Image (cartoon, rainbow, N blue to C red):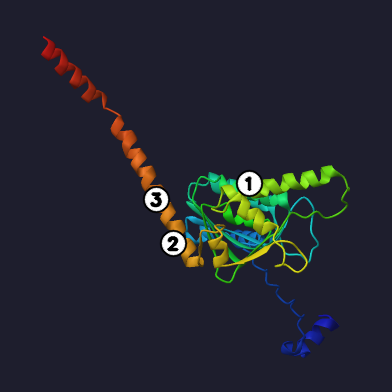
Amino acid sequence: MTRYDNYRQRINPSRIAKPASKPSRRKKGKKSPQKGNTLQTLKQLGQTDLPDNAGSNIHCINIVGQIEGHRNLPPKNKTTKYEHLIPQLVAIEQNPKIKGVILILNTVGGDIEAGLAISEMLSSLSIPTVSLVLGGGHSIGVPIAVATNKSFIAPTATMIIHPIRLTGMVIGVPQTYEYLDKMQDRVVDFVSKHSDITEENFRRLMFQTGELVRDVGTVLIGDEAVKEGLIDGTGGLSQAIKSLNSMIGEDGKESNESNELATSDKVSPDLDSSIESVIEDNEE
C-alpha cells in the first residue's frame, strides 16, 4: 500500500472537491418556416399572407408612400415598389382560390410609368376589384384608384390632380414639351376611360390655378371627387368589402348559369339514337 492510498483512507471522501460541471446550454429552437416566411414577407412587401391563413377569397394590396420607378429612392422614404406588385398581380390572376382584390391607397404619387403599369395590370384582371382611398391618392395614384371595377374614397381623404412634372436635367427644346404632352395624354386618356369624368373636366382640374400655393392643379376632398365623376362613391372598409362580395357573388352566378346552359345544349347519345329510331319507324 502506497503513501497515496493511506492518505486517501484518512481523508473524508465527502470533503473531496468535485470538478465543477459545465453549465448546460439550451439549444435555441428554430423558428417555424411559416413564421419566418411571414416575417420576411412583412419586411419585404409590407404585408402578411393573410388570405392563406384566414381562408379568405379576397386578396388585399397596399399602395402607400411614394411609388418607386426605375430609380431607387432614399432609404428614409416610404415606398411601394412596382417590381413587387406586378408579380403579385400575376400570381393573383393564376390563383383560382382568389375571387376578388381590394386595393388600399394612401400615396403621394411617384413614377408615372410605374403607376401606369400598375393601373393597366389592375384593369386587366379577370376577377372583381375594388379600390379604397384612405388619407390620400395623389398624382399618379389617381389612375391607380380608378383602375378597379369599383372605387371608394373616405370622406376625409384627398386627391390632388396636377400636371406632369420632370426632375433632373431638362433640355429646352420643343421636343421636351411635346414629350410631356404625350405623357400627359396617356394619363388623361386612362382616367377618362376608367371613370365617369370627361377629358375636358379632368384637364380643367389639372390646370386650375389658385388652389395650390406652389403648384397648378386641384385638391378634391371626399364627396368632391365623387361629384366630379372621378370616384364611384364615398365610404370605408365595410362598404368596399360589401361591394366586392356582391360582385364576387354575381360572377359566381353567371359562371353557374353558363355551365348549366352548356350542359343543357349537349344531347346524350342514347337520346339522340332513340329519336332517330322513332323517325325511321314513322317513315316506314
Alpha carbon distance from label 1 to label 2: 29 Å
Q: Secondary structure at mark 2?
A: helix
Mark 1 or mark 2, which is nearer to you? 1
Q: Quadrant of the C terminus?
A: top left
According to the picture, the residue beneath numbered tag 2 turns out to be 242
According to the picture, the residue beneath numbered tag 3 turns out to be 250
Q: Secondary structure at mark 3?
A: helix
Task: Residue 141: tell me if it is visible.
Answer: no
User: Which of the 4 image quadrants contains residue 79?
Assistant: bottom right
Q: Position of residue 57 (x, y in %)?
A: 47, 55
User: Which of the 4 image quadrants contains residue 145?
Assistant: bottom right
Q: Nearer the viewer, residue 267 or 147?
A: 147
User: Which of the 4 image quadrants contains residue 68?
Assistant: bottom right
Q: Position of residue 107 (x, y in %)?
A: 67, 63
Q: Residue at x 72, y 64 (%)?
A: 78
Would you place residue 249 above or below residue 264 in this image?
Answer: below
Q: Secondary structure at mark 1?
A: helix
Q: Quadrant of the N terminus?
A: bottom right
Q: Position of residue 215 (x, y in %)?
A: 76, 63
- The amino acid sitting under disc 3 is Glu
Would you place residue 284 above or below residue 246 in this image?
Answer: above
According to the picture, the residue beneath numbered tag 1 turns out to be 189
Q: Residues within 10 Å of mark 1 (few under 14, many from 20)?
A: some
Q: Nearer the viewer, residue 270 or 128?
A: 128
Alpha carbon distance from label 3 to label 1: 29 Å
Toward the top, the furthest residue is 284
Sequence order check, earlier mark of 1 and 2: 1
- The amino acid sitting under disc 1 is Asp
Sequence order check, earlier mark of 3 and 1: 1
